[in-house]
Amino acid sequence: MTTKAGLFSRVINALIRSLLRMSGASLSPETLALSNHDALHAALDTIHRDQNFNHQHRDRLSGLFELEELEVSDVMKHRTVMRAINADDLPETVVRTVLESPYTRMPVWRNSTENIIGIVHAKDILRALAEPDIDPQTLDVVKIAQKPWFVPDSTSLKDQLGAFLKRKMHFAVVVDEYGEVQGIVTLEDILEEIVGDIADEHDIEIQGVRQEADGSIVVDGSVPIRDLNRALDWNLPDADATTIAGLVINESKLIPEERQAFTFHGKRFIVMKREKNRITRLRIRPVDETALPAE
């Protein structure tokens, strides 16, 4: 009997073969018949060496392969940038926060952002306000909020995607092995790993990223390396760090001071702002190889 996990893998592999066909790749009957994940990965590696291979197709294919290799912690929104609601705020403040947020779902906390007690949906706020006996001054956001769903940060994206679909849910709170809140993950976060969310490689549409007139990129330290790589067609390593600030710390082996600069992976990283031990803003520009001193 085919297990759910086995069926899910077969569906993913079928999607990979479909994307390979759509990319215009010439596949042999043997490759088309492959069901082994590693064998398909090897086939993709061969095709990647083709200079004419469309990088958007490449990213989508890589995203499918990496559903098993990546963990929830690789794509979650970290707690330091997580938008959330204080359950003890005045009701009108809560309503304004929810309605002004670009997100439809937000966690609700009490006493500490580490203590998530619920998840509120904007439509539930609007539905409650439509009741004749409720107004922004009497709204109780805790009663409206749904029970939070906590998931381990080590969960693979493939397993988390399956869990989202099984539960018919879109939002989960991510915790570490000690049960401490690390961030949030959504169904959309995982789907974007497959299909991407950047329409054009020259249009930077990531929150916390800004293109400067001089060609440099100003980046919040919390921006994921993977998002930058996908948006700008870069190839910065993300095996040992998730965010761009983490990459600089990992490469420099220290907590840099403001205005310190480092060069690695073909880029110049300049620390623009630091708060306590966190790098909060960086400027990145390509290295001018001709300007480097001869060794």
Image: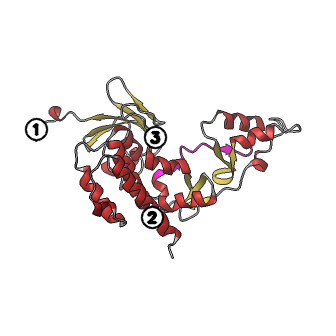
Q: Secondary structure at mark 3?
A: loop
Residue 81 is covered by the magenta coloring: yes
The location of residue 35, given as percent across then percent down, is 37, 66
What residue is disc 3 on? 197
Left or right side of 118 for 256: left
| Viewer-nearest of discs 3 and 1 | 3
Question: Amino acid type of disc 3?
Answer: Asp
Quarter holding the C terminus? top left
The location of residue 6, given as percent across then percent down, is 47, 69
* Res 294 label: 1
Left or right side of 78 for 110: right
State whether residue 254 appears in this view. no
What's the coloring here?
Answer: secondary structure
Question: Amino acid type of disc 2?
Answer: Ser
Which of 30/221 is in front? 30
- Gap between marks 3 and 1 measured at Cα: 41 Å
Which residue corresponds to the image point at 26% horizontal and 44% vertical from the top-left?
A: 264
State whether residue 21 appears in this view. yes
